[in-house]
Amino acid sequence: MNWLRVHIVLERIDPLPVEQALVKLGAISIEFSDAADNPILEPAPGETPLWPTLCLRALFDRAIDDTTIQIAVAGAINAAPMPAMRFEEVANQDWIESWKQTLQPMRFGSDLWVCPTGTACPEPGGTVIELDPGLAFGTGSHPTTALCLDWLANCDNHTGTVLDYGCGSGILSIAALVLGAKRVLGVDLDEQALQATRENAGRNHVTKRLDVVRPESADKTLKFDRIVANILSGTLIELATELQTFCHTGTRIALSGILTNQAESVTTAYKSWVKFELPIERGDWALLSGTVIAT
């Protein structure tokens, strides 16, 4: 069965009524993207902002006709000018399996490998994380995650305890565990992230040494030997005091999700209790790492 995809350039038309009309019409999926070039790098907490000029893409069963969609959009925008619309037929396929075919094993440090499920590690005896893209938000391909994986892989001491704050897919928690961590605590606000972390940990046989909780459930009396937080600069600044409660003198810490031009402001929030090394950069992104000198 084929599908019908419609592209609508909404520009400054209110997207909500259009989205609601298309969902009512039977849209299987709806995606918003930037119709210009105005990136949203860091929304404020609690906000889900959209770009000032929008493009909407919706996917329908091919049985629906173009005119029906056009009528629904016209009814949703009231007196606004009719937006530009383009229709295309999309061949049916297993989207997740198609995406998996494009993924290849990736190496971090000297011998840490992230391999999609069912893919053999290119290096016999390498330390392997098996990750199913269908269950994960991160696979190591984004520079911020890659920087953290390199940092974990290159740590002098892989034992001890690790806090993964903002654990997402669990890739960093699992990396710490397969490298030899005694115990890891993964923390995330998103229940889906916690579920993905548990399932990916099960796939890698490390669940017995992993705990995953929401922030409010984390035991503030715990102290960790290493802390990794791959979030965003504004959130990292807000979390400085909370992360300090999980540290002892000598804790190694890595902060990622930071654009290079944001590194100074994040450093300022932590420098009273962390002695930072030089930032490690990859493209537009930076990782800040250092040692806790005061708690």
Image (tube, rainbow, N blue to C red):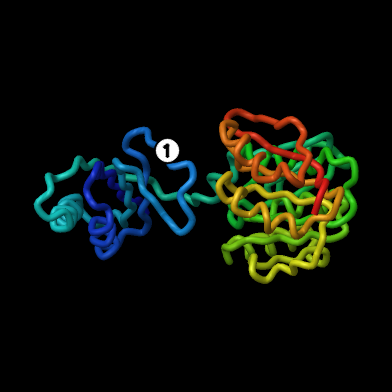
Image quarter (top left, top right, bottom left or bottom right) of the C terminus: bottom right
Q: Residue furthest front?
A: 272
Name the residue that disc number 1 marks: 39
Which of the 4 quarters of the picture holds residue 141? top right
Q: Where is residue 58 in the image (x, y as percent from the top left)?
A: 32, 51
Classify 181 as above or below 143.
below
Q: What's the amino acid at mark 1?
A: Pro
Q: Residue furthest bottom?
A: 217
Along the horizontal axis of the image, is 263 left or right of 164? left
Front-most of 173 and 40? 40
Classify 61 as above or below 12.
below
Q: Report how many numbered discs are placed on residues in the image.
A: 1
Along the horizontal axis of the image, is 13 left or right of 203? left
Q: Position of residue 150 (x, y in %)?
A: 76, 38
Along the horizontal axis of the image, is 276 left or right of 133? right
Q: Residues within 10 Å of mark 1 (few under 14, many from 20)?
A: few
Residue at image coords 29%, 41%: 53
Front-most of 91 and 231? 231
Front-most of 277 and 158? 277
Residue at image coords 18%, 43%: 83
Q: Where is residue 110 in the image (x, y as percent from the top left)?
A: 83, 34
User: The residue tagged with tag 1: helix, strand or loop?
Assistant: loop
Q: Position of residue 220 (x, y in %)?
A: 74, 67
Along the horizontal axis of the image, is 181 left or right of 3? right
Front-most of 54 and 279? 279
Q: Which residue lies furthest to the left in this view?
A: 79
Image quarter (top left, top right, bottom left or bottom right) of the N terminus: bottom left
